[in-house]
Amino acid sequence: MGTALGPRALRVFVALVAMNFAVAAAGQQTPPSRPLLGFGDNQNWILLAPLVYIIGDTSERIVVPAGFVTDLASVPSEFWGPPLSLTPTGQYSRAAIIHDYLYWSQKCTRDQADRLMVIAMKESNVGRFDAVAIYEGVHLGGEQAWLTNAADKARGVPRILPEGFRAPADPNMVWPDYARVLMAQNVTSLEAPDDGSYCRYGNTTDVPRRP
């Protein structure tokens, strides 16, 4: 998940929209926690088991496959301390994995992916301020991440790692180097395991509920 906003700009946008951003009190289909294997610099992680997120009260599910490489919430280091105190591993990190996957698969539009992340944050009980800050960061600054993912897919970067390639032999290995190693070995990415039928729920930020 990427953001290109500076601290001052992000604080301004948070202030403008926070009062109108409704966070659900309790999600009925909370995105589950799944095991991760960190690369040597702990800036990227490999998902070791599928993350299956059922959206609200629907039967639609987003399945982030095992082997997917994520950077969780790619929050710039200047935001880690006060006043924002946002880090890559906050309560929103499960929603960030889902968002990373949607930005990679690109079955939905970018706007739909951003709104689905909001729904996942609401169902993860992410606080109002954090949810607004994360959403505004990706919505206003995530275009480059979207374009980079499209370019990486076109040149064959294996972002969903096949079984047998989900644990680098060198524990100091970082993701950019490992990606180059895999590409040199002609390792290809697994296909996204869905058709994007859930994308329509990203037309709003409302958690879908039964009447």
Image (tube, rainbow, N blue to C red):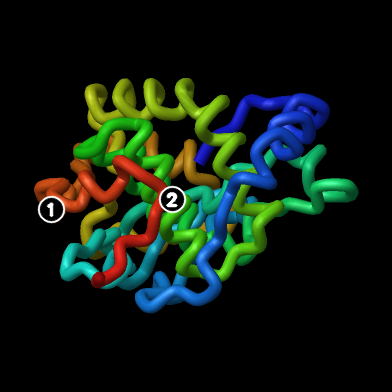
Up-down relation of residue 59 to residue 20 (above or below): below
| Residue 49: image location, x then y, percent | 32, 72
Q: Residue at x 81, y 38 (%)?
A: 78
Which residue is label 1 attached to?
194
Residue 23 percent coordinates (x, y): 56, 60
Q: Residue 114: which quarter of the image?
A: top left
Is 44 on the left or on the right of 205, as rendered? right
Q: Which residue position holds label 2?
A: 117
The secondary element bearing badge 1 is classed as: loop
Relative vertical location of residue 125 with respect to residue 109 in this rendering, above or below: below
Find residue 135 and name its label: none
Q: Nearer the viewer, residue 32 or 128?
A: 128
> Is residue 173 visible from the viewing direction of this image?
no
Judging depth in this view, the residue of 147 and 174 nearest the camera is: 147
Residue 49 in the image: above or below residue 10: below
What amino acid is found at the position of numbered circle 1 in the picture?
A: Asp
- Please rate how many residues cluster around mark 1, counting C-alpha atoms within 10 Å: few if below 14, some from 14 to 19, many from 20: few
Furthest-front residue in view?
211
Residue under the point 24% across and 38% down: 108
List the single residue furthest toward the right.
Answer: 82
Asked if 113 appears above or below 130 in the picture, the reply is above
Q: What residue sits 71% from the left and 33% below the top? A: 16
In the displayed structure image, the side of residue 71 where residue 28 appears, left or right: left
